[in-house]
Amino acid sequence: LAMLILSGLMLILASILCKVSPILILKKGFSTFIIGVSTASSIATFGNCSNVCEKKFGIANNITSFGVPLGIVMFPPATAIYFIFICIYTAEVYGIECSLAWFVLAIFSAVILAIASPPIPGGTLTCYTIMFVQLGLPEEALVVALALDVLLDFIATGMNMFTLQLELLVQAKGMGVVNKL
C-alpha cells in the first residue's frame, strides 16, 4: 500500500508539473512496470525504460542515457519502503520495542541498503542480515523476511522503475529538455 501511495503521488506530481493527464503518463510508462513486475530485475527493464523515456515521454537522449543507468542503481524508493515495513513487522511479531532512535536507524539502514543492493532478482536478500543485526531483530525471523522478500521484490522492482521514469520526466521538464509528451 505504501509503495502504491508513493507511485500515485509521484504520478500526480508529474502530471501537474508536465500539465498532462496522469492516465496518459500511466499508459505510456506502464510497459516498464509490467517488465519489472514480471522479471524482478531492474536491468531487464533497462531497454524498455530508456525507450519509453526517449520515444514516449520525449526526454532528451543525454538525460535518458545518464539518468536511467544511474537511477537503476541509485533510485530504489519502493525497496527501501518494504525493507522498513518488513523490519517493523518482524519487531511487532517478536515483541521488540521500537523507539524513535530504532525507527531512525531502520529508515537510514533501509535507504543505504536499498541503494547498495544489486539490481538483480534476489539481490536484496543479502541486506536482511545487516538490517536485522543493526536493529536487534532475531535471526530466526530471517526466514520469514526472505520469504516476504521473494514476493515483494517483484512489485518493488516494477514500482522502482515506474517511479524512475516519473522522476526523469519531472527533472527533464524542469530543465526544459522534454520535446513532446
Image (tube, grey):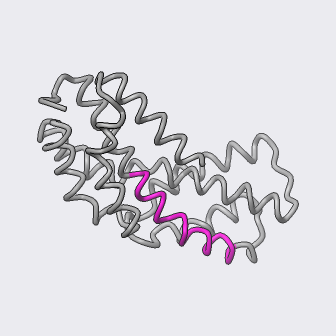
Percent of width and height locating residue 153: 49, 65
Does 156 lie within the magenta span?
Answer: yes
Residue 16 drawn at (x, y percent): 37, 23
User: Going by the image, does 75 lie left or right of 135?
Assistant: left
On screen, residue 166 versus residue 7, left or right, reads: left
Residue 128 locus on image (x, y percent)? 61, 67
Q: Is residue 164 left or right of residue 6?
A: left
Asked where in the image residue 53 lies, by quadrant, the reply is top left
- The segment highlighted magenta reads 142-160
Q: Residue at x 32, y 50 (%)?
A: 30
In this picture, residue 65 sits left or right of residue 141? left
Q: Main secondary structure of the magenta part?
A: helix
Q: Quadrant of residue 130?
A: bottom right
Task: Give the camera-side residue of 9 and 133.
Answer: 9
Instruction: Examine the image and state in which quarter residue 171 appears.
Output: top left
Q: Quadrant of the C terminus?
A: top left
Residue closest to the eye, 48 or 146: 48
- Count every numbered label the image shows and give the total: 0
Q: Looking at the image, which residue is at 78% across and 70% down?
A: 138
Q: Which of these two is toward me, 159 or 20? A: 20
Q: Is residue 150 above or below residue 168?
A: below
Find out whether residue 32 is within the magenta segment: no
Percent of width and height locating residue 71: 32, 48
Residue at image coords 45%, 62%? 117
- Residue placed at 24% from the left, 58% from the top? 46
